[in-house]
Image: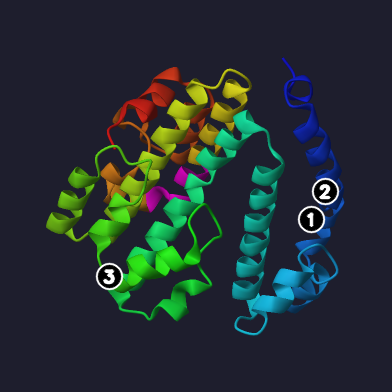
Amino acid sequence: MKLSSVYPYTYGRVAAMRSELLPSDRYSQMLKMSLSELTQFLQGTTYKTEVDTHALHSHGAALIDVAVQDHLGKVAAKLRRISEEGLRQVIDAYLQRRESHNAKTLIRGMIARFPFDRIRLHLMEGSTAIEKYKERYEKGSVDSVISSLQFIRNPARMIAEFAQTKDLFRLEARIDEAYYQYMLGFARNLPVQGDVMRQFIMEEVRFKNLMTGRGSFRANPDMALLPKSCRGTLLQQASCLSGNKECADGIQGQSG
């Protein structure tokens, strides 16, 4: 069953939005640009408003990063606004990824004792208002941030583990793990395109594991998002996620 036949209105609106995407050949050109050239290039695209806004507070790679994330937040909000109910539930679920990112940002800031204004630009627009994040941050409670995440099935256990270990890296890995468990479960229950969403999530897990690096896995094997049977070299991890059902089931079955 095609999405165009199930959600014709949303499909048409999204098809029109695709015209604003950068053509693929532009990315090879962007790789050769300096940061200043890349910033100037983005000012000539749909990212202009965000680049101009954040240029008052950021520059270089930080400016590009925050401008792109801000723009993506607005795109996600628009997609949610134009989507029919079934698709809106999918978008709401995916926006939990931003909740995960923001929770980790808040916790890092709390531990470093940064003022909220210093981390404000690193928060992504999502399903929670920035004012609500500020309220949580000013309470200074890591426990309340963890408890606010809807996708964590057992926040009490995660809170207790962090209280015992004080290991921020482990905590962030647990939050990531809980998010991907939630999304894989959500995809499994989708009546339409569930397999496509699951494949997308698995590719994201694969990428995250590769980015974490071999050294981190060897030093902290429990931090991996992969089950023990699939840990090893990066090549083995990639192969595992590409086609090993045991690995997929292992990720879904690990506790949050």
Q: As rendered, which of 188 and 234 lies closer to the eye? A: 188
Whether residue 108 is visible to the viewer of this picture, yes or no, is no
Please state which of the two labelled residues, at mark 3 or mark 1, is closer to the viewer: 3
Image location of residue 103, percent across then percent down: 39, 58
Residue type at numbered disc 3: Lys
Whether residue 57 is visible to the viewer of this picture, yes or no, is yes
Residue type at numbered disc 2: Ser
> Real-space Cα distance between discs 3 and 1?
42 Å
- Residue 139 image label: 3
- Residue 27 image label: 1
10 Å crowding of disc 2: few (<14), some (14-19), many (20+):
few
Residue 64 on the magenta span: no
Q: Magenta stretch: give its range.
A: 207-215
Please tell me whether mark 1 sits on a helix, a strand or a loop. helix
Residue type at numbered disc 1: Tyr
- Identity of the residue drawn at 39% across and 33% down: 181
Q: Earlier in the sequence, mark 3 or mark 1?
A: 1
10 Å crowding of disc 1: few (<14), some (14-19), many (20+):
few
Q: Main secondary structure of the magenta part?
A: helix
- For the N terminus, the quadrant is top right
Residue position marked by numbered label 2 in the rendering:
24
